[in-house]
Amino acid sequence: MYGLKEAAHYLRLGFYLRDDFLPFGRKNIPMQEFISNLSDIELIDGGSKYQHDASGFQRKINGVFLPKSHAEVQRIIQKANDYKQPVFVISGGKNWGYGTALPVQPEAWILSLEKMKRILNFDSDTYTLDIEAGVSQQDLHEYFQKHNIPAMVPNTGIGGRGNIIGNLLERGFGPAPLQDHASSLMSLKAVMADASEYSSFYRGIAGDIDRGYHWGLGPYMDGLFHQSGLGIVTEAKIKVMPKPEEVTILISEVKSGTPVATVMQACGELTVTLNGQFQASKYIDSAQIEKSAGADTSYFSKTKNPRLLYAGLYTSKKQKRIVQKQVKSILAKYGLKNNHFVNRSKLQVLKRILPKKLFEAVDGLYDLADGVPSPGGLNLLFPDADRLQLEQAEPAKHEYKILWYVPVLSLSPNRVEEIYSMMKNIVKDKEEFLAYTSFTITTIGSNAAVFTVPLIYKEENKEKVYSLYRNLLQEGAERGYFPYRIPIEFMQDLMNLHPEYWQQVQKLKKAYDPNNILSSGRYSI
């Protein structure tokens, strides 16, 4: 029997349990006891803030735990094991287009790390620092400003609310010099699925070896935490890049008739020739340019429906003109001759002469290259919003939904043209349920790129778009193209592609999480 104190506690918890709550019945005793044992950890209902999704996915959230420390995360996972309660981990819930804050499985508790925001131990010699899992791009930007640290935030284009560690563990990328965000991980601290603690080999060892060397000794275990449900990273040491003397962006017109493969060849040669100085090149098609920059782009293009190449250049003051000359020379070999170089001082000139929408788009592109959080990527859903409105926008509540298909490809000309044709053939004539279709290609180093296709649609058309996504996933896989990450709705579809690999992953999942309580279904069978 429950006393008055316990009864009052369960009645208060009924708000979180919603329709499942049976205070004195036996159905939910494990759930009730699970919560009762964690009564000192913040718990809120997930319906209002966390239930909405930018892709139209639907899941049941039992409630949302908001731990403030590594120890609280351990306790939640320990009790989840004790009472067989499924828990899905998010870093901040801004995973727009991939699942927002929703779990993979139909029902789970959410464990959000968004309140773990400490930034620790910046080392000016190695430009490394320790951060907790809830630190956002804006948090890190403000920290650098407050402490006068000339460093660049690893940003992504969704604005200051984007999470640092969450993006890193998803193998995200961006335009700043350390483009591959996953490579910035030096060491980490985590809670395993059985609530035990994991630390990288060199983490905490005298000598701070993990400020300059991230491999450790023996098997490289840290890699298990990328895109998996094997553990919860609560803290990590990451490397950031110091700001160079000169940051310049290139905006180059891609003339009608110029094959996309030619543009990518130029980017590959520039990346090799100007290693470390030419970074993060992106081909942008006319549909996306119009949404993000407006219809009047005549300053940068002589054609009505322009395609553009964007890239960041990182140099010393002495190198700047030499590098720009090399860039123009290499681009000219590939027929790209209408080139513009924009730095901070040039932006002030452009502010006076460009249409407002075009200027804000260029200003946002410059900030991305300069390591400043910028929400320009949200223009796809909010084409009429200014920068302040984009920072406050709520994609999960927008009338239009978004779903990302982002396969990785080599920069071989044949492969570039093949996937470009494949994409156009699969998504053509889909105006009846897609708002519009646009393509971008972002280089990752000199030999690989990510082909980005945002599928934008209204809620009533989501099943048609989900079917389209499955077609893209299937046909892409048959040709050797796999997304670098996958939305929650399609993870089980992914398990049917390259099944031998996922069977090995499943062996690890069963060994580390025999109760299958941690982020079940996340990149696993």
Image (tube, rainbow, N blue to C red):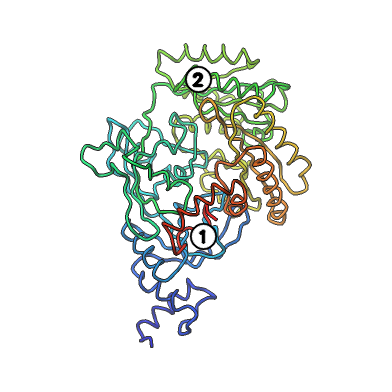
> Could you say whether the residue bearing mark 1 is in a helix, strand or loop?
loop
The residue type indicated by label 2 comes to Val
Q: Nearer the viewer, residue 359 or 465?
A: 465
Indicate the position of residue 443 as horizontal and vertical percent values: 55, 29
Indicate the position of residue 325 as horizontal and vertical percent values: 52, 11
- Labels 1 and 2: the sequence-earlier one: 1
> Could you say whether the residue bearing mark 2 is in a helix, strand or loop?
helix
- 54, above or below 187, in the image: below
Q: Which residue sits at x=65%, y=35%? A: 439
Drawn side of residue 37 relative to residue 507, left or right: left
Q: How many marks?
A: 2
Q: Which residue is mark 2?
A: 272
Q: Which residue sits at x=34%, y=57%? A: 68
Q: Which residue sits at x=35%, y=30%? A: 150
Q: Residues within 10 Å of mark 2 (few under 14, many from 20)?
A: some
Q: Nearer the viewer, residue 160 or 177?
A: 177
Q: Which residue is mark 1?
A: 49
Drawn side of residue 316 relative to residue 466, left or right: left
